[in-house]
Image (cartoon, helix red, strand yellow):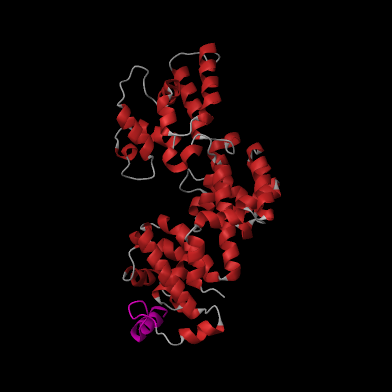
Amino acid sequence: MINTFTSYHLINRDLSRSLERVQSQPMVQRETEYYQENIGRVASIEEFINDDRLFRYAMKAHGLEDMAYAKAFMVKVLEEGISDPESFANKLTDKRYVEFARTYNFAAGGTNTTTYNPAQKGTVDKYLSRAISNGVEPNDPALIGSINTYLSKISDIKSVDDLMGDQEMLSFALMAHGFEVDEVIDLEFLRSVLEGGIDDPESPANKSEDERYKALAGAFNFARYGEDATTYNVTNNLAVERYMRQTLEEDAGKQNEGVRLALYFQRKAPDFRSYYELLADKAVAQVVRTALGFPPALAQADIDKQVELIKERIEIEDFKDPEKLDEFLKRFTTMWELENPSSSQQTSIAALFSQPAEFGISTDMLFTIAQLKR
């Protein structure tokens, strides 16, 4: 059997191809086709929950497959949404529920939740609102014509160049986001805003004091979604992407649990903001303890003491660096293999090696952990 590190490396070195293999599985194809064909017709939480096939697909996409039976619980998650810090989802320790409520945000999006795209309906709504506030009648033929023209052409806009090169479409988008018809705009800066997107805190849109640029870059997010920016739908595209990744991790786990944990950690790592988050997720905490050579018993120690021990060994910001993250996961898969050999031959080989001192755990440390539990 292939060892943990090699198995993880084979999957991770060409993740796109690995996901394509998952997507080609007949069962995955059938369920994805059903989801894509039907999710756009769902206009309420009740319709969503009552379509068991759709609902289970969505739950699995968010790693909540085991909770698919708890429909009343999930209705509460969806009904309260995420806008209120005191909402049900926001108060739960497990942040998967927040992600689920964000993807299926019926509380904020209402009947448009499953069809909403910021470059399409979002921009049209803003354009219409501005036009009405300037005294234009909602049924004005010129207004209706402009909107229909925009909607008929927007899905063909596949890049920043396409948008910048179509004056009619660009003017519509700018007006919708608060720019005036006769306002002088630096086109080079505008291009940098659209190309930079909003994911990088240092992007031109995020650094600008003019919030209109950030709103525009968020609606036409070519930086994040590429040519799909004007057609991207969170409840469709994002859920499908997550379903594929979840299936990939589950399939890997059937062969080697260590590989599943490594892939899961890799997916979650860029979003870690605190050491307490590392410990709140059982799978992530297991990866950290294994990589650092801590025994499972550490999980029973005081949470603040656990954080202190981990902070001495790793910098959480390193997980945002792909190279440092890769090194950490190499360490984890190596340590996992030593503790969970893939074959009897590997067991004999592992016995010849001792843990690296800088990653292992001393007798003094074991004594300290025992004291923390008291």
Quadrant of residue 270 within the rendered picture: bottom left
Task: Tell me the residue at 31%/38% (across/down).
Answer: 204
Q: Is residue 356 magenta?
A: yes
Quadrant of residue 205 within the rendered picture: top left
Left or right of 312? Residue 160 is right
- The answer to whether one can see residue 202 in this image is yes
Q: Residue furthest top?
A: 141
Q: Is residue 160 magenta?
A: no
Left or right of 109? Residue 307 is left
Q: Is residue 221 above or below residue 287?
A: above
Q: Quadrant of the C terminus?
A: bottom left
Task: Tell me the residue at 44%/22% (across/down).
Answer: 172
- The answer to whether one can see residue 300 in this image is no
Q: Which residues are magenta?
A: 355-374
Q: Is residue 343 above or below residue 191?
A: below
Viewer-side residue, 154 vs 309: 154
